[in-house]
Amino acid sequence: MDKKRIFIVDDEAGFTRLLKLTLEKTGNYQVLEENDGTKAWLKAREFKPDIIFLDIVMPKIDGGDVAQQIRSDPLLGHVPIVFLTAIVSRTETTHDIGGFPFLAKPVSLEAINRCIAEHLPK
């Protein structure tokens, strides 16, 4: 079985590291983390992820801008992007943010797994 490739972009290194280790422990995923949003688009091109988890509020570049870079790239435009954010909670809205689904931080592993199952082809 091929491992699904997950790309996590968040300026909180502790968060990305923990999520990476937790997901890889399942044996189902290969995970790349990036803590500098300005490098996210190029890293995504190299890694060719199956899904991207992207923080919205980061220094230097906004997650929305990163999402637009990725969406406009012919190699990456089809890759599902899920925003991770602490600025909006699930109780405030159940809608997407800028056309992208989102998970509110703090996020549980169960929510991440449900999201992966929902947005990745079988």
Image: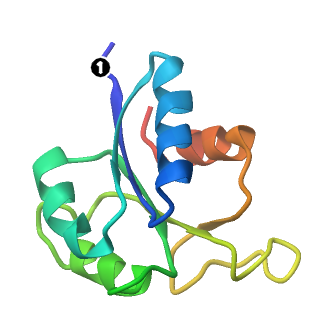
Q: Nearer the viewer, residue 38 or 104?
A: 38
What's the residue at 31%, 68% (across, down)? Answer: 36
User: How is the structure coloured here?
Assistant: rainbow
Q: Residue 113: percent from the left, percent from the top? A: 62, 38
Whether residue 11 is situated above or below residue 29 in the rendered picture = below
Asked if residue 27 is positioned above or below residue 6 in the image, the reply reads above
Vertical comparison of 118 with 53: above or below: above
Look at label 1 and name its amino acid: Asp
Name the residue that disc number 1 marks: 2
Q: Is residue 85 left or right of residue 92?
A: left
Tell me which residue sits at (45%, 43%) in the image. 120
The residue under the point 42% across, 39% down is: 121
Residue 107: quadrant of the picture:
bottom right
Q: Secondary structure at mark 1?
A: loop
Q: Residue furthest right?
A: 91
Residue 26, position in %: x, y? Answer: 53, 18
Q: For mark 1, does the 10 Å Cα neighbourhood hold few (<14), some (14 to 19), or many (20 or more) residues?
A: few
The residue closer to the viewer here, 29 or 34, is 34
Q: Quadrant of residue 6?
A: top left
Q: For the image shown, how many numbered marks are present on the structure?
A: 1
For image coordinates 36% across by 61% down, the residue present is 35
Q: Quadrant of the N terminus?
A: top left
Measured along the vertical axis of the image, is residue 84 above or below residue 62? above
Percent coordinates x, y for residue 41 in the rendering: 20, 68
Q: Name the quadrant of the C terminus.
A: top left
76 relative position to 90: left or right = left
Left or right side of 102 for 80: left
